[in-house]
Image (cartoon, grey):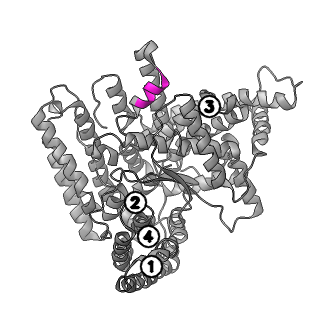
Amino acid sequence: MTRITALRFVLAIVPLAAASATIADTATDAAFENLADEYVSDLSNFSPVFATLIGDHSADDRLDDVDATARAQTRQLLNEYIAALRGFDRDHLSRANQVDAEILRNRLESDLWSMDELQEWAWNPLYYVNISGSAIYSLVARDFAPIETRLINATSRLEQMSRFLEQARRSIEPDRVPKIHVETAIQQNPGLVSIIETMIVPEMGVLSATQQDRLNAAIEAAKDAIADHQTWLEEELLPRAAGDFRIGAELYDTKLAFALDSPLSRKEITARAEQEYESVRNEMYNVAKTVYLGKHPYTAFPDDPDESHKQAIIRAALEEAYQQVPPRDGIVAIAKKQLQQAIDFVIERNIVTMPDDPVEIIIMPEFQRGVTVAYLDPPGPLDRGQPAFYAVAPLPTDWTEKQVQSFLREYNLYSIQDLTIHEGVPGHFLQISLSNRYPSALRSVLWSGPFVEGWGVYAEQMMIAEGYLNHDPLMKLINLKWYLRSVTNAIIDSAIHVDGMARDAAMNLMIEGGFQEEREAAGKWVRAQLSSAQLSTYFVGYQEHIAMRRAVEEAWGDEFTLRRYHDQALSYGSPPVKYVRALMLNQEIPRSN
């Protein structure tokens, strides 16, 4: 999972129009490109914090306004861009601009719908916690400008923190707020103080005495504001939180359509996932038999095994992998070693161009914890040359020894390797690094979640198929288990929000059906409550990626090589897979949903 994916439900902005014909008109293309550039420049008016995240530093000293007046201004801007986009005849745009127009329209309409219909600003306190944390973290995590400049801008944003949090509290409607969202906000809100104390205060010496006095005053005011907000979350909002975290069929289906921009419907995704669930479990059984025979060579397996037999053999084989656990405080060091191992393999096998952009493995910032175990935090697409961060969450200090062991079994050495492929190489880090070289700033900013997350899953499967770790059956088994996780993610995503799946049923599917450890499943249950439509992106994106690869292999025939395919597939940015497929196969550009 990428960090911007985690923030998308918090800081969503806009995109898209439609096109597919063949008569590109130079003047029409130029006019559309001007509109696209204007939109990218306007992102700082939608959200200064989001602008910082994507690498636009024109508003680094401003903190978002989140009151009713600001929402009205955003609504007006969105409608103005939608109207302007409708003025273009897509048949007179180049194929590349047809894609960008479709992407832009989808995001514009999605953001307008999110504001007026989904209305997370009214019921999700995490919306505001993520903005406040990102506002400061995004200024100090990377050296995109002199530290003095970044600290002065951080001072300005800290001075606005009280106003921002007051606006947040006035926007929230307690009876609509789900309890789980408040509980997570209570956990994350103090993380901003941690950022101030660990990333701001140690750097203050570079400022003049006057600037330090101003920053110290801003820090104290911000800490007071954060403490007041924490008290409000704990003592006022939590007791009154009465909302349902399930968003229901109507909202879910619309949100899913915008998030995926795919022809697959909710029911089609569920049916495909349920079919894949059975297929993957059968494949796991076949791999598990080879592991089991290694320990018990005289075992005779039944010709027609029942599900309980398969379950026992798979679990017995997985136990072999679970013996290889990292030390409690050693996950980051192991991930660094395994990342280099994956890089070496990609280069040696000539699988895809290896970018030379910097990547660092870090401890996940406190204000981001509680939703996922790891994510890739890439630099903003407008920030060239800055490092990507592969962030890993530390184990909570209040976990029991049993919970710690459950986590370490789930994130054994094989699992950390699979995770590092997904988040690092040739997964998110490599894919985003190459995709961001595409010249359209609009397309870089408005990247597709299914393309990015689907590529991460594809990268996991492809590396094992290419012989990574010498075809170790335990690595293959864990790799299949991780893919099964993507499958069950897609099943529970809609089952929870639309069909009312309860915790016990979800936990049973993940633990018994997906072989997940209790800590992993419990964390996913929390994540599924806090988000909607995002957990489906992994499975849907992967399905689209493998379908595209098969189609290109068939079209290219003997000219197909992995390096050629991967380099070209990643050369168009990160739009929905259907557009990349059309570009690679010279097909008509489809329209957005």
Image: magenta residue range: 561-567
Residue 160 lies, in percent from the top left, at 34, 77
Q: Which residue is mark 2?
A: 10
Which residue, given by chain and number where applicable, does mark 4 sit on?
175
Label 1 Cα crowd, 10 Å radius (few <14 / some 14-19 / many 20+): few
Assign the C terminus to one quadrant of the image.
Answer: top left
Q: Which one is in front, 484 or 321?
A: 321
Residue position for label 1: 205
Label 1 or label 2, whichever lies nearer to me, is 1
Badge 4: how crowded within 10 Å, few (<14), some, or many (20+)? some
Q: Is 184 left, or right, of 205 in this rendering?
A: right
Residue lying furthest top in this view? 558
Task: Reply yes or no: does residue 586 show up in magenta.
Answer: no
| Residue 442 seen | yes
* Observer-nearest of 188 and 245: 188
Tag 3 secondary structure: helix
